[in-house]
Amino acid sequence: MKVVEFRYLGGNEVPANWRGILSNVAYRYGGELLNTSSIEVKSFNRLERKDTYNVIGIMKGEIEPDRYIVIGNHRDAWSLGSVDPTSGTATMLEITRVLGEMYKNGFRPRRSLMFCSWGAEEYGLIGSIEYIQEYVKVLGARIVSYMNLDIAVNGAYYVNIKSSPVLFDAIVKAAKMVPSAYDPDGQTVYDKWMKVHRNDITNEPKIAFGLGSASDYFGFDQIVGSSNYDATYTFNRAEHKNLSSYALYHTSYEVFSLVKKFIDPDFLAHQSMGQLTGVLALILSESPILPLNISRYAFTLKEIVNSLNTSNPNDLDPLRDAINEFSQVANEFVERSKSMDIENPYEIRLYNDQLLQLERAFLNPLGQGPNDSDMKHIIYAPSKTSTYATLGFPGITDAIVNGIRTEIVNQIAIATFFIRGASSTLKEFDKFIAT
């Protein structure tokens, strides 16, 4: 093993009890790396077969038992995992405890609540993907939303959320009801967003649309086609611009004392995350009309297409026309809800089923191609240039990168086809038949 000393400019010496065993290495953190030499590290691994399993709990809905609101968290960790995933595990268990107490006191959810503890997420999302593939027909027909808690807390500054566009308003409603951790009494998660995480153009909180492939929401996005959410109480990223995640991510130092001393000393961020996710789950479960705002999707589609840069802008005209039609149909759909008989359960069910099917309409059974058949969402899916995150219209984005016009036109045609299909899910039955 070749060992060299790395020298840092302005680095701080690590406390003695945090140092490794290499005697001729100065252990420091921070600062600028001056020595670009390399170090040879030998690792010794074993190839073994291990069994894993999922734990699923269900609180049956009283009125719509065949519609599911799902909360999930993976249970396995690379090392000790006090943050990833145990911050999420602890949060989900607290939500189940509270809802369990409510159930004992007579509460019955309108729609069924599911609680999922996934195994083997770190090994390729095995637990959730296998479960989804086995029950895809049932889940694809019944799930409203999947709410993911992975790294639920890695800081205590504000809540960072990724979701489907249709969940924006429901998330904001929940955020206005939940206290912001370590902030003055009366300040909510929403209030904190408006101070430190606001979209100055729309004067609304920033919520990232599209989830990617980094956690167990992947299968729900790309195979089930539900409208999903992932949240993390995180640190002040403006002060730590060079950190993509918390500093001890996936290390053996990820222990309880890390959370207690540095991340969330009074566990108020964990509490707020549990309240936020729990309140959102109840909003989605208890609202007679599903609180999914399809107008958000219409607006977002226009934003995405305007961000695409093609050598021939006219190539995008068919897609723009389809999005304009979708926007018009979405507006008519919302207007129709205003005259709906909310005392008629069949009329509510019909309207809700159309809302439920919208996200499914964006799934291409063939995926993004022969090597990306699991990347089915034509609007939000990982692309070849961003396999961990997600881009708008990944098929078109990849084609633009390749620079082949026939491929670009083909991908635009595919996206156009699915946008028009999504529009049809929102039309009234007689108008759908007529057109």
Image (cartoon, rainbow, N blue to C red):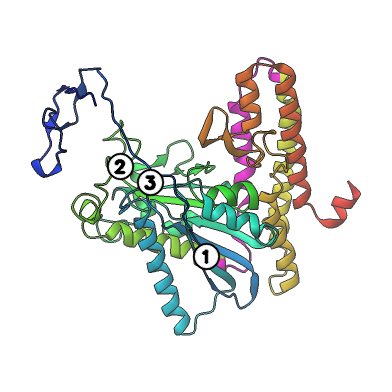
**Which residues are drawn in magenta?**
285-313
Residue 421: x %, y % from top left: 77, 44
Return the disc, 2 or 3, that comes first in the chain's sequence: 3
Residue under label 3: 194
Q: Amino acid at mark 1?
A: Ile
Residue 231: x %, y % from top left: 43, 51
For the residues labelled 2 and 3, the Cα–Cα distance comes to 24 Å
The residue mark sitting in front, 1 or 2, is: 2
Residue 177 visible, this angle: no
- Tell whether 214 sits left or right of 4: right
Q: Amino acid at mark 3?
A: Met
Return the disc, 1 or 2, that comes first in the chain's sequence: 2
- Tell whether 210 sits left or right of 378: left
Residue 78, relative to residue 269: is it above or below? Answer: above
Residue 54, relative to residue 394: is it above or below? Answer: below
Residue 235 visible, this angle: yes
The question of residue 72 being in magenta is answered with: no
The question of residue 286 being in magenta is answered with: yes
Residue appearing at x 39%, y 67% in the figure: 93
Residue 265, relative to residue 98: is it above or below? Answer: above
What is the number of callouts on the image? 3
Residue appearing at x 65%, y 16% in the figure: 403
Q: Amino acid at mark 2?
A: Tyr
Which mark identifies residue 283? 1
Crowding around mark 2 (Cα neighbors within 10 Å: few <14, some 14 to 19, many 20+) is some
Of residue 328 and residue 161, the one placed in the foreground of this image is 161
Whether pointer 1 and pointer 2 mark residues with C-beta atoms closer than 8 Å, the reply is no
Residue under label 2: 246
